[in-house]
Image: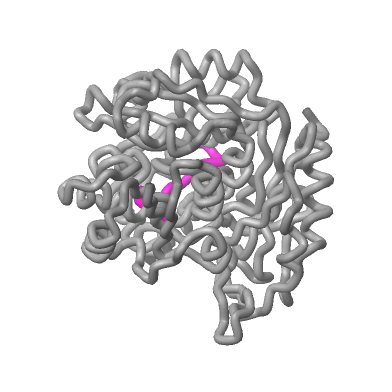
Amino acid sequence: MKILIVGSGGREHAIAASVAKSPKADKIYCAPGNAGIGQIAECVQIGAMEFDKLVTFAKEKEIDLTIIGMDDPLVGGIVDAFEAAGLRVFGPRKNAAILEGSKAFSKDLMKKYNIPTAAYENFDDAEEALAYLETADFPIVLKADGLALGKGVLICNTLEEAKEGVKSIMLDKQFGTAGNRMVIEEFMTGREVSVLSFVDGKTIKTMTSAQDHKRAKDGDQGLNTGGMGTFSPSPFYTEEVDAFCKEHIYQATVDAMAAEGRAFQGIIFFGLMLTPKGPRVLEYNARFGDPEAQVVLPRMKNDIVDVFDACIDGRLDEIDLQFEENAAVCVVLASDGYPVKYEKGLEIRGLENFEGRDGYYCFHAGTKLDEKGRFVTNGGRVLGVTAKGADLKEARENAYAATQWVDFDNKYMRNDIGKAIDEA
């Protein structure tokens, strides 16, 4: 099979690495890809939002399967464009990707179908939002309705903070058009857990659990980022929690989307909060999480191409999804200053140290090859260093040891990824 992956980050590198293990994968392309992906796939300089060019490329190269990694093209309708051209593609259509594309839509869906989530109100008008805040309880959560690179969520402890948040989201357009609408939501407390799942429109199969660390600095301080590290599985995701979510959240979401005429085929990422009152949905994503994919996919036993095919063909019920009885931890190596301002073009040293080491991975996020053929930084999140271990403690030790094998000027990382493991 000839396979095309659309995207350019650590998530797409993790997908490519899994696809490369499949005996069905004869040739892998990635558009636009990055320097690390380029070691296992042929990178094609076409942007993820250039649908016409991607469709033309897939036809010319006779691509058998295209996998959409990123949220923007999914929400923009890339799957519809590929299907209209008679091409086989993995991911939700535009009318289903709205599950991630609009937080207001997903909150309304959960309310309509009694899927447990935080109380909320939607707003199109900043003045109405400000008036609502005058009567609200604090802390409170403000969410830009659209896609905001995982950063469009503000937790406000006071009325003054919340008013400033409304101004930055809806008036100053800090997150662009994503802030044309806004969700104001009750603040929930508890452990956060991420559960990714494969869906074929009617059947859902959940993957092993994970937990992300969004804040830039140790102790969950600093600004929200796209993710500074992850671990899998979550020790807080118990059999009891799993049973509740299967009954009240997972299948209920798939059934709700089907009932709305928006049958979902692809990946649903469930962002959960384990509150004192039980699990609640924080958010949905319509694709693999990044960096969650970097700890979940290395632990998957199945041939991922078989699973993608089953989702597309509506026969996911035939797949026995299995994961290794171990653990994995990913530590993101970022450029100091991320997510605000940082240097690019810095040489990355030591990548060869990962070659031939079983259970260790170095997933590229923001990298490229310079004119001298050297690996250099090309983004805020540069690398995802992942290691497996017999348990979470060993995986964490292995991952942090491996962060010392690679270096670049301005290298920055959190030193407490998976620290919550000690409290489990």
- Does residue 303 appear left or right of residue 75 in this picture? right
Query: Would you say residue 265 sits in the magenta stretch?
Result: no
Q: Nearer the viewer, residue 178 or 196?
A: 196
Residue 303 visible, this orientation: yes
- Which residue is found at the position 38% from the left and 66% from the top? 172
Query: Would you say residue 141 sits in the magenta stretch?
Result: yes
Specify start and end residues of the magenta stretch as a single range.
Answer: 135-148
- Which residue is found at the position 73% from the left and 77% from the top? 409
Q: How is the image coloured?
A: one colour
Query: Which secondary structure is most common in the magenta stretch?
Result: loop
In what quadrant of the picture does the C terminus appear?
top right
Q: Position of residue 13 (x, y in %)?
A: 54, 55
- Which residue is found at the position 43% from the left and 33% from the top? 306
- Does residue 67 appear left or right of residue 18 in this picture? left
Q: Is residue 250 above or below residue 22?
A: above
Q: Position of residue 12 (x, y in %)?
A: 49, 53
Q: Nearer the viewer, residue 56 or 181?
A: 56
Direction left: furthest residue: 84
Direction bottom: furthest residue: 371
Q: Position of residue 235 (x, y in %)?
A: 71, 27
Residue 96, image quadrant:
top left
- Does residue 2 appear left or right of residue 280 in this picture? left
Residue 166 visible, this orientation: no
Q: Nearer the viewer, residue 233 or 355?
A: 355
Q: Nearer the viewer, residue 181 or 346?
A: 346
